[in-house]
Amino acid sequence: MKKKMIAAFGISGALLISSVYSISANTSGYELYKDALKNTHQLESTTMNMSLVLDNNNKEIYRMDSIVKTNRLEDSLGMEGTVSNGLEEMTYEMTKQDGEYLVRKENDKKVYVMESNGSNHGAGLDGDEGKELRNDLENLVDLLTKNYQQKITVEGNEDGTQRIDLELSSSELPIAMNAVTSLMYKHGVMLDDRADDSEASFHSVKPELPKLKKDILIEDIKISAKVSEGNYIEEQFVTAIFSGKDASGTSKKLQFSFKLELTNANETIVSPMDVTGLELVEFQHGHGK
């Protein structure tokens, strides 16, 4: 379930990762942002208001609005949200409790259950192996971003918070990133088309992504973040624009927008889902897809 929920983001999720990995700046700005990201994942609990929008040629084709509550120490999660694709809309709730993910659509009497294969919110990366992995990833990000010095601007606010901004145009992005983005997009669309019937019946509200075949290019990436006095991310805004052509040669321009607002740091309570009178259904992904 978790895997498919994430897959619903499609290429937008890949763009978010790519944009974060494309960040660099003067040492103070870069280190400030990097440390704030790490500190955010180490908060004991959080409440996050998230919004994700995907536009195709200025027409909205997908939107997800959700409130996510996490507790890292208890390894629990609670989410309520709405997704729409311009034709359909669906509300849902999801929790992680007792080692399982529980998902319920709107007022459905069925609750889909999937066993958790790991932890959320950074848990499970403790110990020597986890520390080594984090260090290796950090060194890789540093290496990939070394050519983007002086791109981040940092501005202090009167309340003690700091604003971080970055914008990268297509000419400032490496050829390798566009090549990877093109590959991920093409395969993402193919995997979505091959989703089995059991998954399609649950994830009925999906974006109709244009099947871009060539000239896929990231045109612009903008990132803005607000760092709290406690040195964690309070707000995050990401927009990415990329273009391409479908099999007929028709040009398409996609814009991905992501907004995050974090509140109640270390004070969030995650409530379990009440399944009284509801049917629990084991959810299994198709194999070989």
Image (cartoon, rainbow, N blue to C red):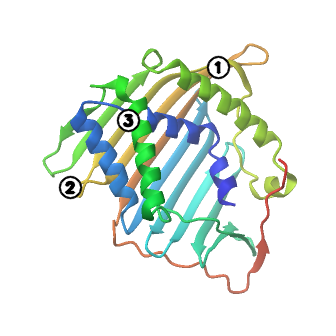
Please state which amino acid type lies under the numbered disc 1: Gly
The number of numbered badges drawn on the structure is 3
Question: At which x and y percent is residue 6?
Answer: 62, 51
Q: Position of residue 211 (x, y in %)?
A: 74, 28
Q: Nearer the viewer, residue 140 or 151?
A: 140
Circle 2 SS class = loop
The residue lying toward the viewer, choosing from 50 and 38, is 38
Q: Looking at numbered disc 3 in the image, what kind of residue is underneath it?
A: Asp
In the rendered image of this protein, does residue 24 appear above or below residue 219? below
Q: Nearer the viewer, residue 205 or 181?
A: 181
Q: Is residue 23 left or right of residue 83?
A: left
Which amino acid type is shown beneath numbered disc 2? Glu
Residues under numbered marks 3 and 1 in contact, where contact means CB atoms less than 8 Å apart: no
Residue at the spot of label 3 = 142
Q: Are marks 2 and 3 in contact (CB under 8 Å)?
A: no
For disc 2, the neighbor class at 10 Å (few under 14, some 14 to 19, many from 20) is few
Q: Closest to the observer: 169 or 210? A: 169
Of tags 3 and 1, the one toward the viewer is 3
Secondary structure under the numbered disc 3 in the rendered image = helix
Q: Which residue is mark 1?
A: 244
How much space separates mark 2 and mark 1, taking CA atoms? 41 Å
For residue 170, side relative to residue 158 (left or right): right
39 horizontally vs 283: left or right? left
Look at 77% across and 59% down and name the residue there: 202
Which is nearer the N-term, disc 2 or disc 1? 2
For disc 2, the marked residue is 229
User: Above or below — where is 184 with respect to 178?
Assistant: below
Using the rendered view, name the quadrant where residue 244 is placed.
top right
The crowding category of the residue bearing disc 3, from other C-alpha atoms within 10 Å (few below 14, some 14 to 19, many at least 20), is: some
Numbered label attached to residue 19: none
From the top left corner, tell me how far across and down residue 190 is, in percent.
78, 36
Circle nearer the N terminus (3, 1) = 3
